Image: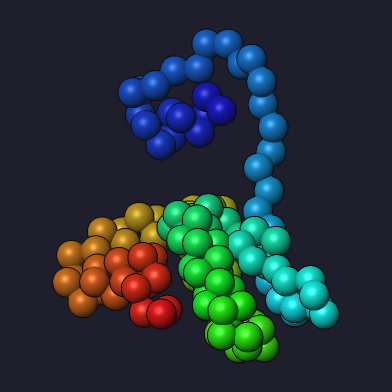
Amino acid sequence: MRALLAERLRGEARVHDLVWSSRFRVHHRVADRYRAGRLLLAGDAAHVHSPAGGQGMNTGIQDGHALGRALAAGDLDAYEARRRPVAQRVVALTDRMTRVATARGRTLRVLRNTLLPVLARIPAVRNRLARELAELDYR
């Protein structure tokens, strides 16, 4: 931990005593089906992914909204057809974001740290990422 902080923060933080530690593992999964008879899945039960981008809560709320609409309309098959592709897209994006954030090789980290600030200055890239993270196009 000390070596990591020294590399990333260059003396701005110090570790004195380690009280608790664990490894964080990320899983990316989407349920094969969102409906099996009377059983319906939504939110974390339907998909699990990295917290990268903060999309988990939005996706779950949108699932709940779509499920409510499908129940009201009596068209439960439409729920899975509408929401599963969204979950697959979110999981794919968070997987890519996690891979970029946790790049292990020095060359990849340098490339990431150099390229991301440059890309962030391009309005079209910034806007596209913001829309994707906010899930504004998944209605």
Residue at 52% over, 24% down: 2
The answer, for residue 87, to whether it is visible in the render is no
Q: Is residue 122 above or below residue 99?
A: below
Residue sticking out furthest to the right = 37
- Looking at the rendered image, the quarter that the N terminus falls into is top right
Say which quarter of the image contains residue 29: bottom right
Q: Position of residue 9 (x, y in %)?
A: 37, 31
Considering depth in this image, is 36 or 94 the residue closer to the camera?
Answer: 36
Considering depth in this image, is 82 or 18 the residue closer to the camera?
Answer: 82
Considering depth in this image, is 125 or 51 the residue closer to the camera?
Answer: 51
Horizontally, is 2 left or right of 132 in the view? right
Q: Where is residue 138 in the image (x, y as percent from the top left)?
A: 42, 79
Q: Position of residue 59 (x, y in %)?
A: 51, 65
Say which quarter of the image contains residue 124: bottom left
- Looking at the rendered image, the quarter that the C terminus falls into is bottom left
Horizontally, is 9 left or right of 74 in the view? left
Residue sticking out furthest to the top = 16
The answer, for residue 24, to whether it is visible in the render is yes
Residue at 50% over, 33% down: 4
Residue at 52% over, 11% down: 16
Q: In this view, does 105 lie above or below 138?
A: above
Say which quarter of the image contains residue 136: bottom left
Residue at 24% over, 71% down: 127
